[in-house]
Image (cartoon, rainbow, N blue to C red):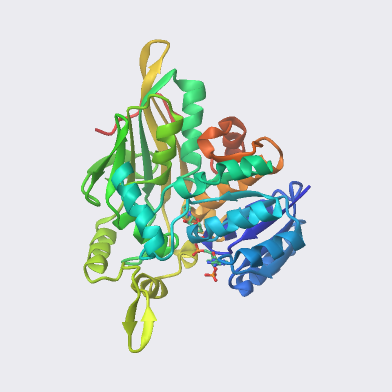
Amino acid sequence: MSRVLVIGCGGVANVAIRKCCQVSEVFSEMCIASRTKAKCDALAADLKDKTTTKITTAHVDADKVEELVALIKAYQPDLVMNIALPYQDLTIMDACLEAGVNYMDTANYEPEDTEDPEWRAIYEKRCQEAGFSAYFDYSWQWAYREKFAKAGLMALLGCGFDPGVTQAYCAYAKKHEFDTIDTIDILDCNGGDHGYAFATNFNPEINLREVSAPGSYWEDGHWVEVPAMSIKREYDFDSVGHKDMYLLHHEEIESLALNIPKVKRIRFFMTFGQSYLTHMKCLENVGMLSTTPINFEGREIVPIQFLKALLPDPASLGPRTHGKTNIGCIFTGKKDGQDKTYYIYNVCDHQECYKEVQSQAISYTTGVPAMCGALMMLTGQWNKAGVYTVEEMNPDPFLEALDKYGLPRSESHNPVLVD
Ligand code: NDP
């Protein structure tokens, strides 16, 4: 029996909330709070006769700590699930500290305004010192470690699929399959087709920022940065087939480099079709991916936010998307003195997801781990004061929950490696 406050009611939150409502014995009461309360009300109305979870809704501007604190104090949840945007991570963490409640999210902090001079100065220093230039990194949220530990509260960072499940796969490989892990390749394949020439599968602004940034990987104790989309490989994915994939910077590489001792190399690859890449390059070339406001006919607009308004809402892709995703990790390393390889992954079908929760598989593969991470925290299976990423937790009950609630693992002990 527990009470959760979910912040955000977009594509991922819709799945997480629907999945929580399938486990009402744990998620017995829930408040859905977001910027657009009408979306929360519509979801609550849809779920009313389908679950015994008692649902209420609220309006909140999660950029405002005082509004969040008032809501948390009034509702008194056991856990706040931040499924809004990465822009709100720090305000929601501040509010959780002030109101004395545990916290979780699905993506690490990045600022909405990347031209903010205060943020920019810290960012540029980090680019120089750390050697990667993505807008997001863990430093902002790791800075809360002591505060959460002192308050006796837990914050779980990045509990979606990647980040999230991919780190649990690493923890599982480290615990059960290897004495030492040498290399990790995280492979994120979306074999789905929504029929549009161009659309993003989750929040367009966050998605396009991520994929247009330089790629980077971890090798021999430091970052190697390369131009965006400059490293391409082809891989034959189980249940999907041959796909081109490109090396990206991705947030979990940063924490895995710390938490997987002696790892020599960590890379992240994501599949993209040619149409997506051509559109993205064109939009980038004409300035539509910019986050810097411009003046248009007397009004300030942010190009990437205007683009978001033009693109299909990711939540509307569900009925149109056919095909499967395949996301997982390939490891090389040693066990009992012998060289060893191992691949653990999940295959998820877009249409099956749509039938179950009216969503495509990208939101599903993020929303289900968010629910399972919350389940771990609410049932005390993951319970440590401080700020943690998923690979720092016991992977076994989490992977069992994923198996049970819709994202079962597959394994290979003889995978084809990525060169
Ligand atoms: P959406 O844009 O669909 O939803 C975001 C939600 O947050 C909307 O309901 C939005 O409200 C709400 N929101 C935005 N700003 C505020 C605010 N200031 N106050 C209150 N609510 C606010 O995003 P997604 O569902 O696609 O993504 C959700 C999160 O999941 C993101 O952080 C994303 O990065 C992450 N993600 C993680 C993945 C993983 O594998 N780890 C994969 C995919 C996504 P409104 O409706 O008014 O706009």
Q: Is residue 301 left or right of residue 22?
A: left
Q: Quadrant of residue 211?
A: bottom left
The reply to whether residue 194 is in sight is no
Q: Is residue 38 left or right of residue 297?
A: right
Q: Is residue 308 left or right of residue 360?
A: left
At a point 78% along the width and 47% down the height, the residue shown is 1
Q: Quadrant of residue 38?
A: bottom right
Estimate the x, y position of residue 226 in percent, counting from the top left.
23, 46
Q: Quadrant of the C terminus?
A: top left
Q: Measured along the vertical axis of the image, is residue 76 above or below residue 233?
A: below
Q: Is residue 248 left or right of residue 46?
A: left
Estimate the x, y position of residue 412 in percent, counting from the top left.
41, 28
Taking the view exactly as shown, the residue that stands out farthest to the bottom is 297
At a point 45% along the width and 46% down the height, the residue shown is 139
Q: Nearer the viewer, residue 280 or 142?
A: 142
Estimate the x, y position of residue 208 in percent, counting from the top left.
35, 60
Q: Measured along the vertical axis of the image, is residue 65 above or below residue 404?
A: below
Q: Measured along the vertical axis of the image, is residue 68 above or below residue 241?
A: below
Q: Nearer the viewer, residue 47 or 333?
A: 333
Q: Nearer the viewer, residue 33 or 237?
A: 33
At a point 64% along the width and 46% down the height, the residue shown is 374
Estimate the x, y position of residue 68 in percent, counting from the top left.
65, 63
At a point 48% along the width and 67% down the height, the residue shown is 316
